[in-house]
Amino acid sequence: MRLAAFALATLAFAGAASADDENKDLELIPRAPPQAAHVAPAPSPIFTGNERVYVENALAFTSLRDDLLVPFPPPLPPRWEDRLFADARLQWPLGSTAFVAYSGRLNVVAQEDLGFPNRGNVTHDLREIYASVEPHPRDYLDAGRINLKSGVALGFNPTDFFKARAVVDPLTADPSVLREDRLGTLMVRAQHVGERVSITAAYAPRVTDPAPLAADPYRGFSPLFGLTNADERWLVKASAQLGEGVNPEVLAYRENGRWKLGANLAQSVGKSTVAYLEWSGGRRLGIADEALAFGREIGAIPPSAPAAITQGGEERFMSQVAVGASYTTETKITFNLEYHYNEAGFSRADWERWFAAGEGRPDSSPIAQELWFVRGYASDRQEPLQRHSVFLRADWVDFLVPKLELTGFVLADAQDGSTFMQLEADYARTDFWSFGFLAGGTTGGRRSNFGSLPREASVLFTARRYF
Amino acid sequence: MFERLAKLALAAGLAVHAASAFAQSAQEIVAAADKVRNAQQPFRSTLTLTEYVRGEERSKSVFVLFSKEDPSGHFRNLLQYVEPPRDAGKRVLLDGQSFWFFDPASQASVRISAQQRLVGQAAIGDVLTVNLAVDYSATIAGIEAIDDAARQKRTCWHLEMKAATDTAVYSRVEYWVEQGTFRPVKGKFYSDSGRLLKIIYYRAFAERLGAVRPAEAVILDAVDSSLATIATFGESRFQDVPDAWFQRDYLPRLQIR
């Protein structure tokens, strides 16, 4: 008993000594009065916490290659561009179970060879406008232009079926940003979110003929339904919570009378890693044959023109895969490493045929135009033209100083080693102002995927003010 | 000499407290302190995080937090950013081993790891609502009289806690709980490598969600001592939070009005 009392007294004495050390931490507390009395302002009856409005100016410079093996048909990409835009995401409640949502961007553009002022200087991108109603708890019905996204990978989403043709005039090629700046699709969507299962069904009607590949610079306020609603499309998808954190999603998609199936799964592996897998597959042509068929449909390629390149012209079941993992360090860096596979993409032999068909031809040649149409088609559909690629992205939050975020990625063609790279720094100077710098470029030989692109390098400066 | 005598007197006093203290197990003390911090019924709360750099206010984030205790005692949390404007509408689902981040700008839900959730401010909501008794095994390291955030002397159990589950955010925690009231006074949170990451002081005890609970937590960054965050719970109320809200597909559907 005496021993126990002595032990307790010793423990308490030691505690008294270490308590002095503990109290030193108090010096680190900011000299601000307790704020408990200052509760956050009551929610506004108009703003629901989902709105975001900002104005940004983006100034870009691009350097072009002048030694392309397959010359790029005019017009060449502009070497400079300044874009001032107001971007808004707004929501208006209609009672307690319904709302109307708008998301869009008003651009004022000046660029090389566009001239100023003219009707090409002002455009509006209508990303979303739709009404949503919840007739029963967690049963939803939405109608209008909606951005419906799927997928768990970062660099390429095989199950994101509505991504095709939806990106207009992107400021950056960072895939995570491309998902922000894309048009929704006119559709009706129904969704049920249960405790363990969620089911979504969407129908997008065909409302007009397909638009050309390049967005019309004189489109003004056109909603561009020719990009998003030129085919009738259906999507049904379901996700389920199968166990502790296991949450797969399966999808069935129909476009142009053809079905595609898809599935995706993301799973935590230990404390710092998330592994993910995304797959889709369906009957289709190789991408070159598909592009040329589309070109003939919209009149960009004369029906009688011979195919400058073909991948066999046979329709068969083909797959797309993205598999990868993210890893986050204690120092707030998150790495994503992914492998992308597009069975409809170019094999090494397809690339050789592409270069052989176009090498040495004038830029006005119909063959050169067809070959670049194929590449433009793949880009327009946000589909890798290469069959195998590797994607590495790093995102460093609070790099050197708080609120400075550094993001970089490399997309490499695994067959020829050529790369597309980008590095971006974004500094949130205050809660309302942020400034950014971006540099990107392509590397590789003249006879490589990325080394044969007209854009060699570009830089972008941005200043953004939130409201 | 006087200081030494004072410490001995304090030690004697603390020893008396200590004798009664050990009647309760360390785990019971942590569980009682958890009940002081968190309501057991599902609730909704506004959480304001004010960041300070070298003592100067740098930025402010406001969240709406929906929280619900599951049968195992873990809290399932769903948060939405309301401020700053650049982050408004972003949502984070923190549910056991399942963490998802939703950005309304991209309309995409991205799965994040336990480590990645700590990168964002929203993780603070998770840290503040965690039931430590569920995720950690505790032992009593001693009885100490330490100053609370208002520099009032508090006689506390000093608890040493080790992670006992995979869901534990930190591998080790030191925790000071006031004797008698079971109010948490201070916590020190360590990484797997033993590095001290955060120091948290609980303060501004007031009536909230049916009991007297800390309305504020001062979170000191132990890695960069120039950084500190004050987390303030604002408007709080009990609210039914259906289990379906913790599905990833519910994230785009959350309405906080």
Image: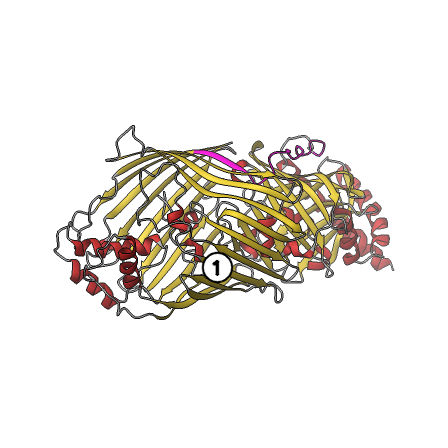
Residue B11 lies, in percent from the top left, at 80, 46
Q: Name the kind of residue labelled 1 in the image.
A: Trp
Q: Which is nearer the eye, A123 or B75?
A: A123
Q: In the rendered structure, does residue A277 fall within the stretch colored magenta?
A: no
- Span highlighted in magenta in the image: A36-55
Residue underneath mark 1: A234
- Placement of the N terminus of chain A among the 4 image quadrants: bottom right
Residue A426: quadrant of the picture: top left
Q: Secondary structure at mark 1?
A: strand
Q: Which is nearer the eye, B42 or B27?
A: B42
Residue A429 lies, in percent from the top left, at 47, 34
Residue B67 lies, in percent from the top left, at 69, 50
Left or right position of A238 against A360 = right
The subunit carrying tag 1 is A
Crowding at label 1, few (<14), some or many (≥20) Cα neighbours within 10 Å? many
Q: Which is nearer the eye, A445 or B193?
A: A445
Q: Residue furthest toward the top? A: A117
Q: In this rendering, is residue B171 above or below A46?
A: below
Residue B222: quadrant of the picture: top right
Q: In this rendering, is residue A192 above or below A47?
A: below
Q: Which is nearer the eye, A159 or B225?
A: A159
| Residue displayed at 17% across by 57% down | A367
Q: Can the viewer see residue B196? A: no
Q: In the rendered structure, does residue A47 fall within the stretch colored magenta?
A: yes
Residue B49 lies, in percent from the top left, at 62, 39
